[in-house]
Image: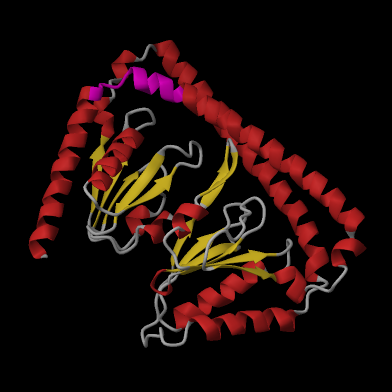
């Protein structure tokens, strides 16, 4: 989703070079420095290592900084300018012994295999999830589900419409990681006045509801941020309406939360749109599906943890062959350019 997330920026700095050459560290350092100066910084986390950053957007400056290894399609975004910053100049390949280069190539093959096993296992889990959904789809009252969507549109949108249709911004709020499912729903919604927690079951219409709300927002010129499901990107998990101060999101496992402050409310799609007694009627079948699904998700996560361990081995070779004084110089150059942009913004104000 980087192409959509970074769309419309004035400038994007794309950091190129192999893993271990300091890109994430520099991005984190710049983010911390800019936050300390009171600027708004959007963080894009690594799905392999959620504590590390793959990119940031400096909201007021309309500037993005991103690891070029992770952002396919970024060159096609409607950014005013893309500047490539080469971290490879800090990497001295001559410091790698011939046998180490062979080892790295072997590890890359192992990494590709680990990722393949990860994706294949998640794909199998998704097929099992489709079995789960089938029971609830077959017992849904679609007219009631449609009415829920229409009621929300009529409640949320009046008075906020524009004659100009808007293009939604597409993102992820989390990912499957070596630690399991990981999300940033709480930090993304912390400053919003209203949060609607959608409850329900697999196949009870949560994603379809969000798609209808997003489509209507786009047609009515209402700004919306559309968050896709990391497990099944064709599904939606959350919408944020910045100017309405509202978020509505799928609040079921693996990102299950409960109202805990004023402005929080629950929308239960199971009780409002699914035939009563569906859970009980298919309890044995659903229990079997849950068991198979859980086993596949655990297996996929273990493959992902294997991928992270292999990637760390590769990364260690590059770290050892990187001159971090050069990395520090690159960071200072980036800081200088950003300071110039900050200065021009302050002058224009």
Q: Position of residue 122 (x, y in %)?
A: 67, 45
Q: Is residue 304 magenta?
A: no
Quadrant assignment, res 61? bottom left
Relative height, residue 107 to residue 263 (above, below) = above
Q: Residue at x 65, y 68 (%)?
A: 206
Quadrant assignment, res 132? bottom right
Colour mapping: secondary structure
Q: Is 231 in front, or is 34?
A: 34
Relative height, residue 241 to residue 256 (above, below) = below
Q: How many marks?
A: 0
Is the magenta region chiefly helix, strand or loop? helix
Q: Residue at x 56, y 33 (%)?
A: 112
Q: Residue at x 41, y 54 (%)?
A: 2
Q: Position of residue 323 (x, y in %)?
A: 25, 21
Identify the residue at the far front of this view: 262
Q: Is 187 in front, or is 137?
A: 187
- Quarter of the rendering occupied by the C terminus: bottom left
Q: Is 66 in front, or is 245?
A: 245
- Quarter of the rendering occupied by the N terminus: bottom left
Residue numbers of the magenta segment: 314-324
Q: Is residue 75 left or right of residue 60?
A: right
Q: Position of residue 230 (x, y in %)?
A: 57, 52
Q: Residue at x 38, y 11 (%)?
A: 97
Q: Position of residue 93 (x, y in %)?
A: 31, 20
Relative height, residue 305 to residue 213 (above, below) = above
Q: Is residue 316 magenta?
A: yes
């Amino acid at each position: 989703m980087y192409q959509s997330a970074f769309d419309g920026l004035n400038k994007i700095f794309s950091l190129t070079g192999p893993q271990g050459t300091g890109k994430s560290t520099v991005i984190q350092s710049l983010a911390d420095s800019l936050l300390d100066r009171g600027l708004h910084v959007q963080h894009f986390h690594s799905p392999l290592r959620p504590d590390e950053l793959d990119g940031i957007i400096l909201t007021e400056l309309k500037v993005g900084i991103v690891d070029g290894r992770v952002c396919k399609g970024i060159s096609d975004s409607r950014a005013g300018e893309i500047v490539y910053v080469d971290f490879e100049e800090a990497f001295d390949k001559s410091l790698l012994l011939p046998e180490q280069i062979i080892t790295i190539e072997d590890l890359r093959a192992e990494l590709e295999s680990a990722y393949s096993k990860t994706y294949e296992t998640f794909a199998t889990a998704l097929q099992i999830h489709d079995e789960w959904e089938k029971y609830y789809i077959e017992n849904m009252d679609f007219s009631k589900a449609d009415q829920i969507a229409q009621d929300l549109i009529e409640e949320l949108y009046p008075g906020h419409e524009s004659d100009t249709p808007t293009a939604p911004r597409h993102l992820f709020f989390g990912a499957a990681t070596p630690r399991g499912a990981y999300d940033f729903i709480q930090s993304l919604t912390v400053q919003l006045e209203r949060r609607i927690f959608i409850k329900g079951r697999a196949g009870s219409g949560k994603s379809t509801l969000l798609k209808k709300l997003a489509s209507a927002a786009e047609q009515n010129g209402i700004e919306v941020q559309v968050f896709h499901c990391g497990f099944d990107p064709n599904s939606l998990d959350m919408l944020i309406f910045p100017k309405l101060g509202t978020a509505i999101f799928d609040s079921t496992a693996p990102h299950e939360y409960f109202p805990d402050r004023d402005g929080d409310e629950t929308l239960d799609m199971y009780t409002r749109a699914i035939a009563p007694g569906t859970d009980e009627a298919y309890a044995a079948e659903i229990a079997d599906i849950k068991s198979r699904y859980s086993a596949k998700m655990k297996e996929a996560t273990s493959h992902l943890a294997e991928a992270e361990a292999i990637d760390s081995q590769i990364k260690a070779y590059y770290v050892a062959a990187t001159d971090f004084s050069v990395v520090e110089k690159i960071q200072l150059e980036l800081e200088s350019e950003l300071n110039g942009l900050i200065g021009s913004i302050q002058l224009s104000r």
